[in-house]
Image: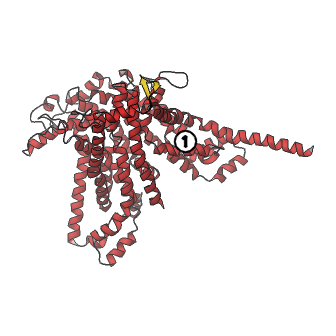
Amino acid sequence: MSLKMNKKKGAVRREGVISDLDYKYPKTKILYWAIFAAMCVAAAICLAPPLWVILSSVKDTKEFYQIPPTLVPHSYDFSKIGKIWSQFAFGKYYMNTIFLTVYSIAWSIFSNGLAGYVLSKIKPRGSSVVFALILASMMIPTSVSMVPVYKNIINFPIGGFNLINTFLPMILMTGCNAFMTIVYKSFFDGIPTALLEAAKIDGCGEIRSFAHIVLPLSKPIIFTAIILAFNHAWADFFWPNLVLKDRSTYTVIVEVFHIKTSIPQDQALMILSFAIIPPAIMFLIFQKNIMQGLTMSGIKG
Amino acid sequence: MRAENKRKRTIGQAVMYWLRRDAIGWVLLLPSLFCFTIFMWQPLISGIGMSFFDTKGFETTEFIGLENYVKIISDSGFVNAVQNTVEYALWSIVIGLFVPVIVAIMLNEMIHAKGFFRFAVYFPCMVPSIVTSVMWLIIFDPSAGGLLNHILSLIGLEPSQWLQNSSITIPLIVLTMTWGGFGSTTILYLADLQGVNTELYEAIEIDGGGIFKKLKYITLPYMSGMIKMMFIMQIIGVFQVFQQPLAMTGGGPNNASISLALVAYNYAFSSMEVGKSVATSVVTGLMIFAFTIVYMRLKKSNED
Protein backbone atom coordinates (compact mmCIF):
# COMPACT_ATOMS: atom_id res chain seq x y z
CA MET A 1 0.00 0.00 0.00
CA SER A 2 2.71 2.40 1.02
CA LEU A 3 4.64 1.49 -2.08
CA LYS A 4 1.77 2.60 -4.26
CA MET A 5 1.63 5.91 -2.45
CA ASN A 6 5.33 6.41 -2.93
CA LYS A 7 5.07 5.76 -6.63
CA LYS A 8 2.57 8.54 -6.91
CA LYS A 9 4.97 10.89 -5.20
CA GLY A 10 7.59 9.89 -7.73
CA ALA A 11 10.35 8.90 -5.31
CA VAL A 12 10.69 5.95 -2.97
CA ARG A 13 10.78 7.07 0.63
CA ARG A 14 13.03 5.36 3.11
CA GLU A 15 10.90 3.49 5.60
CA GLY A 16 13.53 1.75 7.70
CA VAL A 17 16.02 2.78 10.32
CA ILE A 18 18.48 4.13 7.74
CA SER A 19 17.47 7.72 7.16
CA ASP A 20 18.56 9.97 4.31
CA LEU A 21 20.92 11.66 6.72
CA ASP A 22 22.52 8.36 7.77
CA TYR A 23 22.88 7.40 4.13
CA LYS A 24 25.27 10.33 3.50
CA TYR A 25 28.00 8.53 5.50
CA PRO A 26 30.06 6.14 3.36
CA LYS A 27 29.98 3.55 6.16
CA THR A 28 26.21 3.47 6.08
CA LYS A 29 26.27 3.28 2.31
CA ILE A 30 28.40 0.15 2.54
CA LEU A 31 26.04 -1.27 5.13
CA TYR A 32 23.04 -0.57 2.92
CA TRP A 33 24.58 -2.34 -0.03
CA ALA A 34 25.64 -5.23 2.18
CA ILE A 35 22.02 -5.61 3.23
CA PHE A 36 21.07 -5.37 -0.44
CA ALA A 37 23.47 -8.20 -1.22
CA ALA A 38 22.07 -10.27 1.63
CA MET A 39 18.57 -9.71 0.26
CA CYS A 40 19.76 -10.88 -3.16
CA VAL A 41 21.05 -14.08 -1.55
CA ALA A 42 17.73 -14.54 0.27
CA ALA A 43 15.82 -14.00 -2.98
CA ALA A 44 18.03 -16.54 -4.72
CA ILE A 45 17.42 -19.12 -1.99
CA CYS A 46 13.69 -18.58 -2.39
CA LEU A 47 13.53 -18.64 -6.17
CA ALA A 48 16.35 -20.99 -7.18
CA PRO A 49 14.87 -24.36 -6.08
CA PRO A 50 11.57 -24.03 -7.98
CA LEU A 51 13.41 -22.52 -10.94
CA TRP A 52 15.85 -25.42 -10.89
CA VAL A 53 12.91 -27.85 -10.87
CA ILE A 54 11.24 -26.17 -13.84
CA LEU A 55 14.44 -25.74 -15.87
CA SER A 56 15.72 -29.25 -15.17
CA SER A 57 12.40 -30.80 -16.09
CA VAL A 58 12.77 -29.63 -19.69
CA LYS A 59 16.40 -30.76 -19.88
CA ASP A 60 17.16 -33.31 -22.54
CA THR A 61 16.85 -36.73 -20.87
CA LYS A 62 20.41 -37.64 -21.89
CA GLU A 63 21.80 -34.49 -20.30
CA PHE A 64 19.66 -35.04 -17.21
CA TYR A 65 21.40 -38.28 -16.30
CA GLN A 66 24.89 -37.33 -17.44
CA ILE A 67 27.64 -37.36 -14.80
CA PRO A 68 28.62 -34.83 -13.62
CA PRO A 69 25.17 -33.23 -13.87
CA THR A 70 24.71 -29.70 -15.15
CA LEU A 71 23.14 -27.11 -12.86
CA VAL A 72 21.81 -25.00 -15.71
CA PRO A 73 20.64 -27.00 -18.71
CA HIS A 74 22.44 -26.73 -22.04
CA SER A 75 19.89 -28.62 -24.05
CA TYR A 76 16.13 -28.36 -23.98
CA ASP A 77 13.62 -30.97 -24.98
CA PHE A 78 10.17 -29.45 -24.85
CA SER A 79 8.56 -32.52 -26.39
CA LYS A 80 8.94 -34.12 -22.94
CA ILE A 81 6.19 -31.85 -21.61
CA GLY A 82 3.51 -33.35 -23.86
CA LYS A 83 4.90 -36.85 -23.52
CA ILE A 84 4.79 -36.88 -19.71
CA TRP A 85 1.49 -35.01 -19.68
CA SER A 86 -0.20 -37.76 -21.69
CA GLN A 87 1.80 -40.62 -20.14
CA PHE A 88 0.45 -39.76 -16.68
CA ALA A 89 -2.89 -38.57 -18.06
CA PHE A 90 -2.32 -35.32 -16.23
CA GLY A 91 -5.25 -33.60 -17.90
CA LYS A 92 -7.56 -35.63 -15.68
CA TYR A 93 -5.83 -34.50 -12.48
CA TYR A 94 -5.99 -30.91 -13.64
CA MET A 95 -9.69 -31.27 -14.42
CA ASN A 96 -10.32 -32.86 -11.03
CA THR A 97 -8.43 -30.09 -9.26
CA ILE A 98 -10.20 -27.37 -11.24
CA PHE A 99 -13.58 -28.97 -10.51
CA LEU A 100 -12.78 -29.19 -6.80
CA THR A 101 -11.42 -25.64 -6.75
CA VAL A 102 -14.40 -24.06 -8.48
CA TYR A 103 -16.97 -25.76 -6.25
CA SER A 104 -14.91 -25.10 -3.13
CA ILE A 105 -14.72 -21.40 -3.94
CA ALA A 106 -18.46 -21.20 -4.61
CA TRP A 107 -19.45 -23.10 -1.48
CA SER A 108 -16.96 -21.25 0.68
CA ILE A 109 -18.34 -17.86 -0.36
CA PHE A 110 -21.93 -19.01 -0.06
CA SER A 111 -21.67 -20.62 3.34
CA ASN A 112 -19.11 -18.43 5.12
CA GLY A 113 -20.32 -15.23 3.49
CA LEU A 114 -23.94 -15.82 4.45
CA ALA A 115 -22.94 -16.78 7.98
CA GLY A 116 -20.85 -13.62 8.31
CA TYR A 117 -23.78 -11.54 7.02
CA VAL A 118 -26.34 -13.11 9.35
CA LEU A 119 -24.05 -12.78 12.37
CA SER A 120 -23.28 -9.17 11.52
CA LYS A 121 -26.52 -7.70 10.24
CA ILE A 122 -29.57 -9.93 10.81
CA LYS A 123 -28.52 -11.24 14.23
CA PRO A 124 -31.47 -13.57 14.92
CA ARG A 125 -31.97 -14.33 18.61
CA GLY A 126 -29.48 -16.98 19.72
CA SER A 127 -26.98 -16.31 16.97
CA SER A 128 -24.46 -14.92 19.43
CA VAL A 129 -24.08 -18.47 20.75
CA VAL A 130 -23.22 -19.61 17.23
CA PHE A 131 -20.65 -16.86 16.91
CA ALA A 132 -19.07 -17.86 20.23
CA LEU A 133 -18.92 -21.48 19.07
CA ILE A 134 -17.30 -20.46 15.79
CA LEU A 135 -14.72 -18.37 17.63
CA ALA A 136 -14.06 -21.25 20.01
CA SER A 137 -13.51 -23.69 17.17
CA MET A 138 -10.58 -21.57 16.00
CA MET A 139 -8.87 -22.29 19.30
CA ILE A 140 -9.31 -26.02 19.31
CA PRO A 141 -6.77 -28.14 17.43
CA THR A 142 -8.36 -30.12 14.63
CA SER A 143 -6.31 -33.28 15.18
CA VAL A 144 -8.84 -34.68 17.66
CA SER A 145 -11.57 -34.68 15.04
CA MET A 146 -9.59 -36.51 12.33
CA VAL A 147 -11.10 -39.97 12.94
CA PRO A 148 -14.71 -38.85 13.57
CA VAL A 149 -14.64 -36.66 10.46
CA TYR A 150 -13.45 -39.68 8.49
CA LYS A 151 -16.29 -41.67 10.03
CA ASN A 152 -18.73 -38.99 8.90
CA ILE A 153 -17.29 -39.17 5.41
CA ILE A 154 -17.58 -42.94 5.02
CA ASN A 155 -21.02 -42.87 6.61
CA PHE A 156 -22.49 -39.43 6.00
CA PRO A 157 -24.88 -38.48 8.84
CA ILE A 158 -27.62 -37.58 6.37
CA GLY A 159 -28.58 -40.54 4.21
CA GLY A 160 -25.66 -42.70 5.28
CA PHE A 161 -23.80 -42.25 1.98
CA ASN A 162 -20.20 -43.25 1.57
CA LEU A 163 -18.44 -40.17 0.20
CA ILE A 164 -15.08 -41.83 -0.47
CA ASN A 165 -13.88 -41.03 -4.01
CA THR A 166 -16.13 -37.98 -4.23
CA PHE A 167 -15.18 -34.32 -3.93
CA LEU A 168 -18.13 -33.53 -1.69
CA PRO A 169 -16.32 -33.78 1.69
CA MET A 170 -13.60 -31.30 0.67
CA ILE A 171 -16.14 -28.93 -0.87
CA LEU A 172 -18.41 -29.01 2.19
CA MET A 173 -15.45 -28.53 4.52
CA THR A 174 -14.67 -25.15 2.98
CA GLY A 175 -18.07 -24.06 4.29
CA CYS A 176 -16.98 -24.18 7.92
CA ASN A 177 -14.00 -21.88 7.79
CA ALA A 178 -14.13 -20.03 11.10
CA PHE A 179 -11.50 -17.54 10.04
CA MET A 180 -13.30 -16.59 6.82
CA THR A 181 -16.61 -16.27 8.65
CA ILE A 182 -15.02 -13.81 11.06
CA VAL A 183 -13.38 -11.86 8.23
CA TYR A 184 -16.76 -11.58 6.47
CA LYS A 185 -18.50 -10.60 9.69
CA SER A 186 -16.08 -7.80 10.44
CA PHE A 187 -16.34 -6.62 6.83
CA PHE A 188 -20.15 -6.50 7.02
CA ASP A 189 -19.90 -4.78 10.39
CA GLY A 190 -18.32 -1.94 8.44
CA ILE A 191 -21.36 -1.48 6.17
CA PRO A 192 -23.65 1.10 7.79
CA THR A 193 -26.91 -0.42 9.01
CA ALA A 194 -28.71 2.79 7.99
CA LEU A 195 -28.13 1.82 4.37
CA LEU A 196 -29.94 -1.48 4.87
CA GLU A 197 -32.72 0.16 6.85
CA ALA A 198 -33.29 2.61 4.03
CA ALA A 199 -33.66 -0.36 1.70
CA LYS A 200 -36.11 -1.96 4.08
CA ILE A 201 -38.24 1.19 4.09
CA ASP A 202 -38.24 1.02 0.32
CA GLY A 203 -39.65 -2.50 0.64
CA CYS A 204 -36.56 -4.67 0.26
CA GLY A 205 -36.58 -8.02 2.07
CA GLU A 206 -33.48 -9.44 3.71
CA ILE A 207 -32.53 -11.51 0.70
CA ARG A 208 -33.08 -8.73 -1.81
CA SER A 209 -31.14 -6.20 0.22
CA PHE A 210 -28.34 -8.75 0.50
CA ALA A 211 -28.29 -9.33 -3.24
CA HIS A 212 -28.68 -5.71 -4.35
CA ILE A 213 -26.83 -3.74 -1.69
CA VAL A 214 -24.48 -5.93 0.29
CA LEU A 215 -23.09 -8.07 -2.51
CA PRO A 216 -22.05 -5.19 -4.79
CA LEU A 217 -20.30 -3.56 -1.83
CA SER A 218 -18.54 -6.82 -0.99
CA LYS A 219 -16.71 -7.24 -4.28
CA PRO A 220 -13.23 -6.61 -2.83
CA ILE A 221 -13.58 -9.04 0.06
CA ILE A 222 -15.13 -11.70 -2.15
CA PHE A 223 -12.25 -11.29 -4.58
CA THR A 224 -9.71 -11.81 -1.79
CA ALA A 225 -11.74 -14.77 -0.54
CA ILE A 226 -11.68 -16.33 -4.00
CA ILE A 227 -7.91 -16.11 -4.15
CA LEU A 228 -7.46 -17.53 -0.65
CA ALA A 229 -9.89 -20.34 -1.46
CA PHE A 230 -8.07 -21.06 -4.72
CA ASN A 231 -4.74 -21.39 -2.96
CA HIS A 232 -6.21 -23.61 -0.33
CA ALA A 233 -8.06 -25.85 -2.75
CA TRP A 234 -5.06 -26.18 -5.07
CA ALA A 235 -2.63 -27.12 -2.29
CA ASP A 236 -5.02 -29.12 -0.11
CA PHE A 237 -3.58 -32.51 0.71
CA PHE A 238 -4.77 -34.07 3.94
CA TRP A 239 -8.39 -34.86 3.16
CA PRO A 240 -8.00 -35.37 -0.60
CA ASN A 241 -5.34 -37.94 0.22
CA LEU A 242 -7.65 -39.80 2.58
CA VAL A 243 -10.84 -39.44 0.56
CA LEU A 244 -9.70 -39.84 -3.05
CA LYS A 245 -8.57 -43.45 -3.25
CA ASP A 246 -9.36 -44.14 -6.88
CA ARG A 247 -6.69 -42.90 -9.24
CA SER A 248 -9.28 -41.38 -11.57
CA THR A 249 -10.34 -38.99 -8.78
CA TYR A 250 -6.83 -37.82 -7.77
CA THR A 251 -6.07 -34.13 -7.62
CA VAL A 252 -2.70 -32.81 -8.81
CA ILE A 253 -1.33 -32.73 -5.27
CA VAL A 254 -2.45 -36.26 -4.43
CA GLU A 255 -0.82 -37.47 -7.65
CA VAL A 256 2.42 -35.66 -6.74
CA PHE A 257 2.40 -37.35 -3.35
CA HIS A 258 1.82 -40.80 -4.79
CA ILE A 259 4.43 -40.46 -7.50
CA LYS A 260 7.08 -38.85 -5.28
CA THR A 261 10.32 -40.64 -6.06
CA SER A 262 8.91 -43.83 -7.56
CA ILE A 263 9.43 -42.65 -11.15
CA PRO A 264 12.58 -41.45 -12.97
CA GLN A 265 13.70 -38.16 -11.52
CA ASP A 266 13.34 -36.12 -14.70
CA GLN A 267 9.71 -37.16 -14.96
CA ALA A 268 9.14 -36.40 -11.27
CA LEU A 269 10.53 -32.89 -11.76
CA MET A 270 8.21 -32.35 -14.70
CA ILE A 271 5.24 -33.35 -12.57
CA LEU A 272 6.36 -31.00 -9.82
CA SER A 273 6.50 -28.25 -12.44
CA PHE A 274 2.92 -29.04 -13.44
CA ALA A 275 1.92 -28.51 -9.82
CA ILE A 276 3.96 -25.33 -9.27
CA ILE A 277 3.08 -23.38 -12.39
CA PRO A 278 -0.66 -22.66 -11.86
CA PRO A 279 -0.28 -21.11 -8.37
CA ALA A 280 2.85 -19.30 -9.59
CA ILE A 281 0.85 -17.71 -12.40
CA MET A 282 -1.88 -16.77 -9.92
CA PHE A 283 0.74 -15.13 -7.76
CA LEU A 284 2.26 -13.20 -10.66
CA ILE A 285 -1.14 -11.79 -11.57
CA PHE A 286 -2.71 -11.24 -8.16
CA GLN A 287 0.38 -10.55 -6.03
CA LYS A 288 -1.12 -7.50 -4.37
CA ASN A 289 -4.44 -9.12 -3.48
CA ILE A 290 -2.74 -12.21 -2.13
CA MET A 291 -0.50 -10.19 0.16
CA GLN A 292 -3.45 -8.06 1.26
CA GLY A 293 -5.39 -11.21 2.09
CA LEU A 294 -2.41 -12.45 4.04
CA THR A 295 -1.96 -9.31 6.16
CA MET A 296 -5.68 -9.29 6.77
CA SER A 297 -5.54 -12.88 7.99
CA GLY A 298 -2.53 -12.13 10.15
CA ILE A 299 -4.19 -9.24 11.89
CA LYS A 300 -7.49 -10.96 12.51
CA GLY A 301 -6.23 -14.51 12.96
CA MET B 1 -62.46 -5.68 23.32
CA ARG B 2 -60.22 -3.09 21.88
CA ALA B 3 -57.35 -3.96 24.16
CA GLU B 4 -57.61 -7.63 23.23
CA ASN B 5 -57.62 -6.76 19.56
CA LYS B 6 -54.56 -4.71 20.06
CA ARG B 7 -52.76 -7.52 21.86
CA LYS B 8 -53.69 -9.95 19.11
CA ARG B 9 -52.21 -7.64 16.60
CA THR B 10 -49.03 -7.35 18.52
CA ILE B 11 -48.77 -11.13 18.77
CA GLY B 12 -49.41 -11.31 15.06
CA GLN B 13 -46.78 -8.67 14.53
CA ALA B 14 -44.36 -10.53 16.75
CA VAL B 15 -44.86 -13.67 14.68
CA MET B 16 -44.39 -11.69 11.50
CA TYR B 17 -41.31 -10.05 12.96
CA TRP B 18 -39.96 -13.42 14.02
CA LEU B 19 -40.60 -14.82 10.56
CA ARG B 20 -39.01 -11.90 8.82
CA ARG B 21 -36.00 -11.56 11.04
CA ASP B 22 -35.17 -14.58 13.18
CA ALA B 23 -36.46 -17.36 10.94
CA ILE B 24 -34.84 -16.00 7.84
CA GLY B 25 -31.63 -15.44 9.76
CA TRP B 26 -31.51 -19.02 10.92
CA VAL B 27 -32.35 -20.32 7.45
CA LEU B 28 -29.46 -18.34 5.98
CA LEU B 29 -27.19 -19.70 8.71
CA LEU B 30 -28.11 -23.28 7.89
CA PRO B 31 -25.36 -24.09 5.35
CA SER B 32 -22.68 -22.89 7.73
CA LEU B 33 -24.23 -24.60 10.76
CA PHE B 34 -24.53 -27.83 8.78
CA CYS B 35 -20.83 -27.82 7.84
CA PHE B 36 -19.61 -26.77 11.27
CA THR B 37 -21.67 -29.49 12.91
CA ILE B 38 -20.59 -32.31 10.63
CA PHE B 39 -16.94 -31.40 10.25
CA MET B 40 -16.11 -29.67 13.50
CA TRP B 41 -18.36 -29.72 16.52
CA GLN B 42 -19.77 -33.22 16.43
CA PRO B 43 -16.40 -34.82 15.50
CA LEU B 44 -14.65 -32.98 18.29
CA ILE B 45 -17.02 -34.23 20.95
CA SER B 46 -17.25 -37.72 19.51
CA GLY B 47 -13.46 -37.83 19.20
CA ILE B 48 -12.93 -37.12 22.86
CA GLY B 49 -15.60 -39.71 23.67
CA MET B 50 -14.07 -42.34 21.39
CA SER B 51 -10.74 -42.14 23.19
CA PHE B 52 -12.35 -43.90 26.17
CA PHE B 53 -13.68 -46.78 24.09
CA ASP B 54 -12.32 -49.95 22.60
CA THR B 55 -12.77 -49.89 18.82
CA LYS B 56 -13.25 -52.28 15.98
CA GLY B 57 -12.68 -50.69 12.61
CA PHE B 58 -14.11 -47.21 13.01
CA GLU B 59 -16.87 -48.32 15.42
CA THR B 60 -16.67 -48.17 19.19
CA THR B 61 -17.32 -51.46 21.01
CA GLU B 62 -17.00 -51.13 24.79
CA PHE B 63 -16.08 -48.52 27.36
CA ILE B 64 -12.57 -49.11 28.66
CA GLY B 65 -11.88 -45.90 30.54
CA LEU B 66 -8.31 -44.70 30.30
CA GLU B 67 -6.91 -47.90 28.85
CA ASN B 68 -6.14 -46.33 25.46
CA TYR B 69 -4.19 -43.59 27.17
CA VAL B 70 -2.27 -46.08 29.32
CA LYS B 71 -1.48 -48.13 26.22
CA ILE B 72 -0.15 -45.26 24.13
CA ILE B 73 1.87 -43.69 26.94
CA SER B 74 3.53 -46.98 27.80
CA ASP B 75 4.43 -47.47 24.13
CA SER B 76 8.05 -46.52 23.50
CA GLY B 77 6.99 -45.15 20.13
CA PHE B 78 4.89 -42.49 21.85
CA VAL B 79 7.76 -41.27 24.01
CA ASN B 80 9.94 -41.18 20.91
CA ALA B 81 7.29 -39.19 19.02
CA VAL B 82 6.96 -36.69 21.89
CA GLN B 83 10.73 -36.25 21.92
CA ASN B 84 10.77 -35.77 18.16
CA THR B 85 7.92 -33.29 18.27
CA VAL B 86 9.72 -31.25 20.93
CA GLU B 87 12.85 -31.47 18.77
CA TYR B 88 10.86 -30.16 15.79
CA ALA B 89 9.65 -27.28 17.92
CA LEU B 90 13.14 -26.43 19.20
CA TRP B 91 14.68 -26.51 15.75
CA SER B 92 11.86 -24.46 14.33
CA ILE B 93 12.59 -21.81 16.95
CA VAL B 94 16.34 -21.89 16.29
CA ILE B 95 15.94 -21.81 12.52
CA GLY B 96 12.49 -20.46 11.88
CA LEU B 97 11.75 -17.78 14.47
CA PHE B 98 14.40 -15.22 13.66
CA VAL B 99 14.75 -15.65 9.91
CA PRO B 100 11.53 -13.73 9.16
CA VAL B 101 12.35 -11.02 11.72
CA ILE B 102 15.76 -10.41 10.16
CA VAL B 103 14.51 -10.58 6.57
CA ALA B 104 11.62 -8.23 7.36
CA ILE B 105 13.95 -5.64 8.91
CA MET B 106 16.33 -5.88 5.95
CA LEU B 107 13.48 -5.73 3.46
CA ASN B 108 12.11 -2.66 5.18
CA GLU B 109 15.43 -0.87 4.57
CA MET B 110 15.37 -1.50 0.84
CA ILE B 111 14.70 1.34 -1.54
CA HIS B 112 15.97 -0.59 -4.54
CA ALA B 113 14.03 -3.54 -5.94
CA LYS B 114 11.83 -3.74 -2.86
CA GLY B 115 8.88 -5.07 -4.83
CA PHE B 116 11.00 -7.80 -6.38
CA PHE B 117 12.40 -8.87 -3.01
CA ARG B 118 8.93 -9.00 -1.55
CA PHE B 119 7.80 -11.13 -4.47
CA ALA B 120 10.79 -13.47 -4.13
CA VAL B 121 10.46 -13.88 -0.38
CA TYR B 122 6.78 -14.72 -0.61
CA PHE B 123 7.09 -16.98 -3.63
CA PRO B 124 7.82 -20.23 -1.69
CA CYS B 125 4.53 -19.77 0.17
CA MET B 126 2.71 -20.16 -3.13
CA VAL B 127 4.31 -23.55 -3.76
CA PRO B 128 1.92 -26.21 -2.35
CA SER B 129 3.53 -27.74 0.73
CA ILE B 130 3.53 -31.27 -0.64
CA VAL B 131 5.36 -30.01 -3.71
CA THR B 132 7.86 -28.24 -1.44
CA SER B 133 8.47 -31.48 0.45
CA VAL B 134 8.91 -33.60 -2.66
CA MET B 135 11.10 -30.95 -4.28
CA TRP B 136 13.47 -30.87 -1.30
CA LEU B 137 13.35 -34.65 -1.08
CA ILE B 138 14.78 -34.69 -4.62
CA ILE B 139 17.31 -31.95 -3.81
CA PHE B 140 18.42 -33.96 -0.75
CA ASP B 141 18.96 -37.04 -2.94
CA PRO B 142 21.70 -38.96 -1.08
CA SER B 143 23.24 -40.46 -4.24
CA ALA B 144 26.29 -38.87 -5.85
CA GLY B 145 24.11 -37.40 -8.59
CA GLY B 146 21.84 -35.58 -6.10
CA LEU B 147 21.80 -31.82 -6.51
CA LEU B 148 23.23 -30.88 -3.11
CA ASN B 149 25.80 -33.68 -3.17
CA HIS B 150 26.87 -32.48 -6.60
CA ILE B 151 27.26 -28.93 -5.28
CA LEU B 152 29.24 -30.28 -2.32
CA SER B 153 31.55 -32.16 -4.67
CA LEU B 154 32.08 -28.97 -6.72
CA ILE B 155 33.50 -27.28 -3.63
CA GLY B 156 35.43 -30.41 -2.72
CA LEU B 157 33.34 -31.79 0.14
CA GLU B 158 32.21 -35.34 0.86
CA PRO B 159 28.64 -36.26 -0.13
CA SER B 160 26.12 -36.44 2.70
CA GLN B 161 23.32 -38.91 3.40
CA TRP B 162 21.02 -35.92 4.12
CA LEU B 163 17.59 -37.13 5.26
CA GLN B 164 18.89 -40.69 5.66
CA ASN B 165 21.26 -39.48 8.39
CA SER B 166 18.97 -39.74 11.40
CA SER B 167 20.82 -37.10 13.42
CA ILE B 168 20.06 -34.32 10.92
CA THR B 169 16.70 -35.49 9.56
CA ILE B 170 14.60 -33.24 11.79
CA PRO B 171 16.70 -30.08 11.28
CA LEU B 172 16.56 -30.65 7.52
CA ILE B 173 12.79 -31.09 7.57
CA VAL B 174 12.51 -27.91 9.65
CA LEU B 175 14.72 -26.14 7.10
CA THR B 176 12.36 -27.06 4.29
CA MET B 177 9.38 -26.02 6.42
CA THR B 178 11.06 -22.69 7.07
CA TRP B 179 11.75 -22.26 3.37
CA GLY B 180 8.11 -22.86 2.60
CA GLY B 181 6.66 -20.76 5.37
CA PHE B 182 8.90 -17.86 6.38
CA GLY B 183 7.72 -15.62 3.55
CA SER B 184 4.24 -15.11 4.91
CA THR B 185 5.57 -14.33 8.38
CA THR B 186 8.05 -11.89 6.85
CA ILE B 187 5.28 -10.07 5.03
CA LEU B 188 3.30 -9.87 8.28
CA TYR B 189 6.28 -8.36 10.12
CA LEU B 190 6.83 -6.00 7.21
CA ALA B 191 3.22 -4.82 7.41
CA ASP B 192 3.65 -4.40 11.15
CA LEU B 193 6.82 -2.34 10.65
CA GLN B 194 4.88 0.23 8.63
CA GLY B 195 3.30 1.23 11.93
CA VAL B 196 6.57 2.41 13.51
CA ASN B 197 6.39 6.09 14.24
CA THR B 198 9.28 7.55 12.23
CA GLU B 199 9.42 10.57 14.52
CA LEU B 200 10.88 8.28 17.16
CA TYR B 201 13.74 7.52 14.80
CA GLU B 202 14.28 11.22 14.30
CA ALA B 203 14.30 11.73 18.05
CA ILE B 204 17.10 9.20 18.38
CA GLU B 205 18.97 10.92 15.57
CA ILE B 206 18.72 14.25 17.34
CA ASP B 207 20.14 12.57 20.44
CA GLY B 208 23.06 11.49 18.27
CA GLY B 209 22.12 7.82 18.07
CA GLY B 210 22.95 5.76 15.01
CA ILE B 211 21.26 2.98 13.12
CA PHE B 212 21.84 0.28 15.70
CA LYS B 213 20.49 2.44 18.53
CA LYS B 214 17.31 2.93 16.51
CA LEU B 215 17.07 -0.78 15.91
CA LYS B 216 17.66 -1.65 19.55
CA TYR B 217 15.47 0.95 21.20
CA ILE B 218 12.64 1.36 18.73
CA THR B 219 12.33 -1.28 16.02
CA LEU B 220 12.90 -4.41 18.08
CA PRO B 221 10.79 -3.35 21.09
CA TYR B 222 8.07 -2.41 18.62
CA MET B 223 8.19 -5.87 17.05
CA SER B 224 8.54 -7.79 20.31
CA GLY B 225 4.79 -8.26 20.86
CA MET B 226 4.37 -9.80 17.45
CA ILE B 227 7.51 -11.91 17.81
CA LYS B 228 6.10 -13.41 21.02
CA MET B 229 2.84 -14.20 19.24
CA MET B 230 4.65 -15.79 16.30
CA PHE B 231 6.72 -17.81 18.74
CA ILE B 232 3.61 -19.42 20.21
CA MET B 233 1.95 -19.76 16.80
CA GLN B 234 5.00 -21.56 15.53
CA ILE B 235 4.99 -24.01 18.43
CA ILE B 236 1.28 -24.65 17.84
CA GLY B 237 1.94 -25.23 14.15
CA VAL B 238 4.96 -27.44 14.66
CA PHE B 239 3.20 -29.61 17.24
CA GLN B 240 0.87 -30.61 14.42
CA VAL B 241 3.67 -31.30 11.92
CA PHE B 242 2.48 -34.09 9.68
CA GLN B 243 2.73 -33.60 5.93
CA GLN B 244 6.47 -32.98 5.75
CA PRO B 245 7.63 -36.11 7.59
CA LEU B 246 4.95 -38.15 5.82
CA ALA B 247 6.07 -37.00 2.38
CA MET B 248 9.81 -36.75 2.97
CA THR B 249 10.73 -39.64 5.25
CA GLY B 250 7.55 -41.48 6.20
CA GLY B 251 8.75 -40.89 9.77
CA GLY B 252 12.07 -42.64 9.19
CA PRO B 253 14.87 -43.47 9.16
CA ASN B 254 13.98 -45.80 12.03
CA ASN B 255 11.24 -43.49 13.34
CA ALA B 256 13.81 -40.70 13.80
CA SER B 257 11.45 -38.11 12.37
CA ILE B 258 8.04 -39.49 13.31
CA SER B 259 5.78 -36.85 14.87
CA LEU B 260 2.78 -37.14 17.19
CA ALA B 261 0.37 -36.34 14.37
CA LEU B 262 1.97 -39.00 12.19
CA VAL B 263 1.68 -41.55 15.03
CA ALA B 264 -2.03 -40.76 15.34
CA TYR B 265 -2.43 -41.03 11.56
CA ASN B 266 -0.68 -44.40 11.46
CA TYR B 267 -2.77 -45.76 14.33
CA ALA B 268 -5.95 -44.75 12.51
CA PHE B 269 -5.16 -45.64 8.90
CA SER B 270 -2.36 -48.24 8.96
CA SER B 271 -2.75 -50.40 12.05
CA MET B 272 -6.47 -49.68 12.51
CA GLU B 273 -6.17 -49.04 16.25
CA VAL B 274 -8.60 -46.17 16.13
CA GLY B 275 -9.02 -45.79 19.89
CA LYS B 276 -5.28 -45.32 20.33
CA SER B 277 -5.22 -42.85 17.46
CA VAL B 278 -7.88 -40.69 19.05
CA ALA B 279 -6.19 -40.88 22.44
CA THR B 280 -2.90 -39.72 20.87
CA SER B 281 -4.73 -36.84 19.20
CA VAL B 282 -6.39 -35.84 22.47
CA VAL B 283 -3.03 -35.74 24.26
CA THR B 284 -1.52 -33.69 21.42
CA GLY B 285 -4.59 -31.48 21.40
CA LEU B 286 -4.29 -30.76 25.11
CA MET B 287 -0.65 -29.70 24.70
CA ILE B 288 -1.59 -27.43 21.79
CA PHE B 289 -4.57 -26.05 23.69
CA ALA B 290 -2.26 -24.97 26.52
CA PHE B 291 -0.16 -23.00 24.03
CA THR B 292 -3.30 -21.57 22.45
CA ILE B 293 -4.38 -20.11 25.77
CA VAL B 294 -0.97 -18.45 26.13
CA TYR B 295 -1.40 -17.13 22.60
CA MET B 296 -4.82 -15.64 23.31
CA ARG B 297 -3.46 -13.96 26.44
CA LEU B 298 -0.55 -12.47 24.48
CA LYS B 299 -2.86 -11.33 21.71
CA LYS B 300 -5.12 -9.62 24.15
CA SER B 301 -2.28 -7.86 25.92
CA ASN B 302 -0.89 -6.77 22.53
CA GLU B 303 -4.20 -5.28 21.54
CA ASP B 304 -4.64 -3.38 24.80
- Mark 1 packing: few (<14 Cα in 10 Å), some, or many (20+)? many
Colour treatment of the image: secondary structure
Left/right of residue A274 with respect to residue B294 in the rendered view: left
Residue type beneath disc 1: Gly
Query: Which residue appears at 58% of the width and 51% of the height?
Result: A189
Q: Secondary structure at mark 1?
A: helix
Q: How many marks?
A: 1
Q: Nearer the viewer, residue B95 or A177?
A: B95
Query: Which residue appears at 9% of the width and 33% of the height?
Result: A67
* Quarter that holds the N terminus of chain B: top right
Which residue is at the far left?
B156
Q: Position of residue B56 (x, y in %)?
A: 42, 22
Query: Which residue appears at 27% of the width and 45% of the height?
Result: B87
Q: Is residue B130 above or below residue B181?
A: above
Callout 1: chain: A
Q: Position of residue B304 (x, y in %)?
A: 48, 62
Q: Nearer the viewer, residue B275 or A179?
A: B275
Which residue is at the far bottom?
B207
> Which residue matches tag 1?
A113
Q: Position of residue B248 (x, y in %)?
A: 26, 35
Where is residue B197, by image quadrant? bottom left
Q: Is residue B163 above or below residue B97?
A: above
Q: Is residue B221 above or below residue B98?
A: below
Where is residue B228, by image quadrant? bottom left
- For residue A236, say whether it is visible: no
- For residue A142, say whether it is visible: yes
Q: Position of residue B7 (x, y in %)?
A: 85, 44
Q: Nearer the viewer, residue A1 or B262?
A: B262
